[in-house]
Image (cartoon, rainbow, N blue to C red):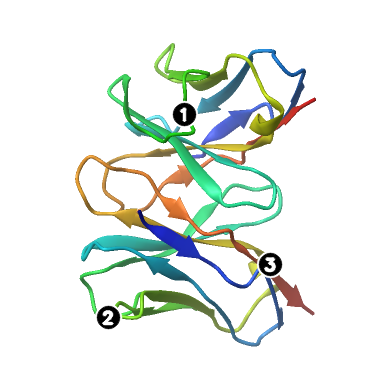
C-alpha cells in the first residue's frame, strides 16, 4: 500500500524568504501523480501544484515549485518570496494512475507560519 | 470561482444518533468524494461516487456509512449510528473528470463532534 510522509509538523519562514516543505512517499508503482494542497485556516483545500511521475521536469507555478526525486521518492515544495497569505496547512498527496481508483493518499500536513 | 459547499460547518451529535452531512458539488462535476480527518491525523479517503453509484470505498467506509445524491445537486454522507471515534473533520470534494488535470475541488469541511 502507498504511504505519504510529511516529517515537519510545523515550519516558519520570514516574509519574502524561501521555505521548503518535505514530503516522501512509498509506492511500488511507476506511474502516479503527486500534489501539494494548501488549506488556509477554516477554508477549503486548494490545489497548489501537481506533478506527473513520468515527467522528469519539476513542476512550477509562479512562486511555488517542486523538487521531484523519483528514485528517492521525494517530493518537496519550495515557496519563494513567502507572503503572509501563504500561511496555511500544506498537504502532500499521492494518487495512483491505475484506472478504477480515484482516491488520494494524504500526508499528515505541515503547518506553515509566515512571520512579518 | 465555483465552490463546493458543505453544511453544516459544525455539528454536535449524541453517540448512537444518525447524522447527515451535506455537500453541494460544482454543478458540472461528475465525480464526488468524501474524506475525513481526525484531529491531528492525516486526511483519509472514505468513498468516491460516480454515475449514481459508489466507485471505490475504503475499509473505514463500513455499513454504518452511506452516500447518496438524492436530487442531482446534493451529495450526502450519512452515518447511521455515530461513535465517539467518528469525531472528525469531513471533507467533500468533486472533480470534472477522473483524471487530475486540475485536481479536486474541496469544500471547507464539516466538523463532526460526537459526544
CA gap between label 2 and label 1 equals 37 Å
Q: Earlier in the sequence, mark 2 or mark 3?
A: 2
Q: Is residue B3 left or right of residue A59?
A: right
Residue A35, given in percent of the width and then of the height, sits at 41, 62
Name above or below for residue A10 compared with residue A17.
above
Q: Is residue A34 visible?
A: yes
Which residue in the structure is indicated by mark 2?
A57
Mark 3: few/some/many CA within 10 Å (<14, 14-19, 20+): many
Q: Which mark is residue A87?
A: 3
The answer to which quarter of the image holds residue A12 is bottom right
Front residue of B4 and B62: B62
Question: Dot 2 surroundings within 10 Å: few (below 14), some, or many (20 or more)?
Answer: few
* Rendered position, A11 above or below B1: below
Same chain for mark 2 and mark 1? The answer is no
Chain containing the residue with disc 2: A
Q: Which residue, given by chain and number where applicable, does mark 1 sit on?
A: B61
Q: Say what secondary structure mark 3 lies in.
A: loop
In front here: B66 or A38?
Answer: B66
Rendering quarter of residue B108: top right
Which x, y percent locates residue B41?
63, 51
Q: Which mark is in front, 1 or 3?
A: 1
- The answer to the question of whether label 1 and label 3 lie on touching residues, with beta carbons closer than 8 A, is no
Residue at the image position 23 percent from the left and 54 percent from the top: A97
SS at circle 2 = loop
Q: Residue at x 46, y 31 (%)?
A: B25
Amino acid at each position: 500500500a502507498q504511504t505519504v510522509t510529511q516529517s515537519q509538523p510545523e515550519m516558519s519562514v520570514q516574509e519574502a524568504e524561501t521555505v521548503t516543505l518535505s514530503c516522501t512517499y512509498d509506492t511500488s508503482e511507476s506511474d502516479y501523480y503527486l500534489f501539494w494542497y494548501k488549506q488556509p485556516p477554516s477554508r477549503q483545500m486548494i490545489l497548489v501544484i501537481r506533478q506527473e511521475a513520468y515527467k522528469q521536469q519539476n513542476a512550477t507555478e509562479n512562486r511555488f515549485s517542486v523538487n521531484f526525486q523519483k528514485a528517492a521518492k521525494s517530493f518537496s515544495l519550495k515557496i519563494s518570496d513567502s507572503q503572509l497569505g501563504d500561511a496555511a496547512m500544506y498537504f502532500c498527496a499521492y494518487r495512483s494512475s491505475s484506472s478504477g481508483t480515484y482516491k488520494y493518499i494524504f500526508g499528515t500536513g505541515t503547518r506553515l507560519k509566515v512571520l512579518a | 470561482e465555483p465552490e463546493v459547499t458543505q453544511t453544516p460547518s459544525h455539528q454536535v451529535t449524541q453517540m448512537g444518533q444518525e447524522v447527515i452531512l451535506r455537500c453541494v458539488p460544482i454543478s458540472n462535476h461528475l465525480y464526488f468524494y468524501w474524506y475525513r480527518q481526525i484531529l491531528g491525523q492525516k486526511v483519509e479517503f472514505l468513498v468516491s461516487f460516480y454515475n449514481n453509484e459508489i466507485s471505490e470505498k475504503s475499509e473505514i467506509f463500513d455499513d454504518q456509512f452511506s452516500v447518496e445524491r438524492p436530487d442531482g445537486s446534493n451529495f450526502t454522507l450519512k452515518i447511521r449510528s455515530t461513535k465517539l471515534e467518528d469525531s472528525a473533520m469531513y471533507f467533500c470534494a468533486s472533480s470534472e473528470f477522473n483524471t487530475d488535470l486540475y485536481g479536486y475541488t474541496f469544500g471547507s469541511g464539516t466538523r463532526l463532534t460526537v459526544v
